[in-house]
Amino acid sequence: MTGPDPTHGVVIALGKPGDSLLTALIVAVVVLLLLVLLLRHMIRKRGGWRRFRRRLGRELALTRRAFGEPLRAYRRHRRGVRALTRQLSDPRGGLLVRRLLDAAGAALADAPGAVPYAVRLEPGWAAVQIAGRSLPEPPAPWEAAAERGPQRWELPLDEQHALPTAGPLAGADVRPLPVAVGMADDACVHLDLAAGPRLVTVEGDTAARSRLLQAMAAQLDRPGSGASVIVTAGLHPQHRGRRLDTALRELEAAAAAADGDRDSGEIGESGRPDMTVVVCAAPSPEQARRLGALAASGAVVCLVDGRTAGHAWALRIDGRGRVVAPELGLDADSAPLGRAVVAAVRADRRRLRRGASVPGRLREKERPLPEQEEGLHETRLLEEAEIPRGEPAEATPEGAVPTRTATGSDLLAEPTAARERTTAASSGTREE
């Protein structure tokens, strides 16, 4: 016999299957309607639908640009490395830059105070920037610049054969001393260090200015550059150099003995003496005064890491490698320069090896001069120039004495520690 069923007499109410779905749908419609009304009220309060669409379009464009900028910057960097590498690795590139500067200087011989000081090279086109007032009309094949900017003469590169063969200007015993400083759009920018006060300071971000100074010094240390480079102590932690006071005494004695003649003891490819370039860091006020006197006399060109007193060209660089000098009309990206200089020096070494392997008279024609072979030998440390960030450079063992002194080419090695010195960009005469 079974007991009574406990569920007997209990009524269970079940809702219809569509009630909850209908309720949720009604709530969603009401919420959506409220949101639409609220959005409409806010849009009307802010100027209407047309202004809202324009503002929304701007925000979307800015967002797209912000997310795409890293990729565009990387592509610009790679494009700049390729362009600078082609320019610096081609021996005819340096000759073309000097020829443009010489030809522009010859055309400006009758214009008092007019000096060509920079060259911009881009595919199929060249421009020479000129400092001076009341420039004459450019003679053929030069053309006056049509765009606004620094004073410059332009020239299609397919007409360079029409340039007159220009020798050194009367009273000028030093040829142009151009170095590449970076990219401006698609143009390689070269600055003639011998055209100005011959005292150039590199200021701004510590790591970036060190890289720029090292790349400039390495270019000047290449064979055929027309420069004899002296790298002083304290510029790079891994390489010893002469003390700045010692180098200054030697240069002052040589200048006095030669009665102002800037003869470093080496003869360049044009038969004129090579220009002596002193690369140093943070000179004292007295050392800066002596450097300024040597530069003013035309005996040397001085590249200084950091701010110094004296009449100078000041190149200011930020952490991204953008180098500016408003007085010179210079605004360029120097970030690709280091890798391009490394590739150019490697090309020099390959040409040297090819010249050494060719027999007979051809080998004799292509063999570099003894001073060029020495310069190429001293650039072997450029292979390690691109040290990845975060990997310290190999340190010299304690107590060990380096077997050689540093040259400009060696400076492309990344320092183990950055030097912290505050700088301020300025041009003209400076007082400490």
Image (tube, rainbow, N blue to C red):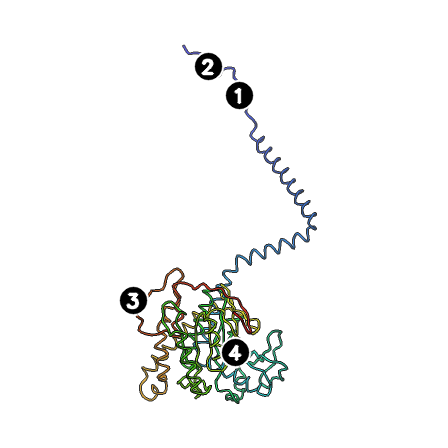
Q: Which residue was labeled with disc 4? A: 197
The amino acid type, in three-letter code, at marker 3 is Gly
From the viewer's perspective, is residue 255 above or below residue 55? below
The circle on residue 12 is 1
The answer to which image quadrant residue 375 occupies is bottom left
Residue appearing at x 52%, y 72% in the figure: 314
Q: Which residue was labeled with disc 3? A: 399
Q: Secondary structure at mark 4?
A: loop
Labels 4 and 2: the sequence-earlier one: 2
The amino acid type, in three-letter code, at marker 2 is Asp
Labels 3 and 2: the sequence-earlier one: 2
Q: Is residue 41 left or right of residue 426?
A: right
Q: Which quadrant does the N terminus fall into?
A: top left
The amino acid type, in three-letter code, at marker 4 is Pro
Q: CA distance from mark 3 to mark 2?
A: 101 Å
From the viewer's perspective, is residue 258 above or below residue 331? below
Residue closer to the observer: 152 or 28: 152
Labels 1 and 4: the sequence-earlier one: 1
Residue appearing at x 55%, y 57% in the figure: 64
- The reply to whether residue 185 is in sight is no
Q: CA distance from mark 2 to mark 1?
A: 15 Å
Q: Which residue was labeled with disc 2? A: 5
Badges 2 and 1: C-beta atoms under 8 Å apart? no
Q: Secondary structure at mark 1?
A: loop
Q: Nearer the viewer, mark 3 or mark 2?
A: 3
